[in-house]
Amino acid sequence: MQNEASYIVEHMKTTMMNTVGNTHNATDAPVQILSAGPTIQFLAFFTGVNWSAYGFNSDSYQLSYCPAFLLALTKCDNSVPKTSLGNKTAYFTPNLAGNSVSVGIVECWDPDNAGLVPPYGTPDNPCVIMNTSIPLPYVSTN
């Protein structure tokens, strides 16, 4: 679980550092947190060429990377395959914080029984919690 959580965090840091844009453009902010129904959440970001996203499905505990995200439709472009980054993600909490994105990830052996409040997990169901802040060097907050 620690390997999976570390891989996810490193993947996000590597890809999101290429985000380009101005956060004051209300109709097209370069980083957006979107929902596609009650159980699917996206962290979408603009790379200067196209939109990409990280999608989390709380029903299947899948966290995926979608290199071609259709922002207007809030879904991955089916012509480009998405990459599954993990299937033991109990919680995925992205937040916008000025010129960075903070991300919290909880990975559990059995994410269905992670618990609702910290501390997550039990001796029989260990969990790993990782939090990170991803700077966005090409995003203007002015």
Image (tube, rainbow, N blue to C red):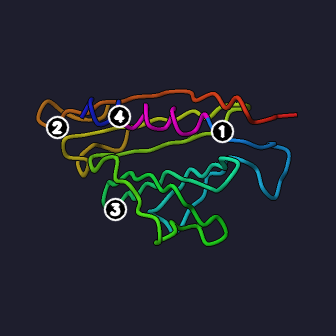
Give the Cα distance between marks 2 and 4.
20 Å
Whole-percent x and y of residue 118? 36, 33
Prevailing SS of the magenta stretch: helix
Where the C terminus falls, by quadrant?
Answer: top right
Contact check, label 1 and label 2, Cβ < 8 Å: no
Closer to the camera in the image, 127 or 83: 83
Where the N terminus falls, by quadrant?
Answer: top left
Which residue is under mark 2? 125
Which residue is under mark 3? 59
Which residue is under mark 4? 7
Pointer 1 or 3: first along the chain: 3
Compared to 54, does 60 lie above or below?
Answer: below
Callout 1 secondary element: strand
Whether residue 139 sits left or right of residue 129 in the image: it is right
Q: Amino acid at mark 1?
A: Leu
Which residue is under mark 1? 96
**Which span is picked out in magenta?**
7-17
Query: Residue 3 falls in which quadrant of the image?
Result: top left
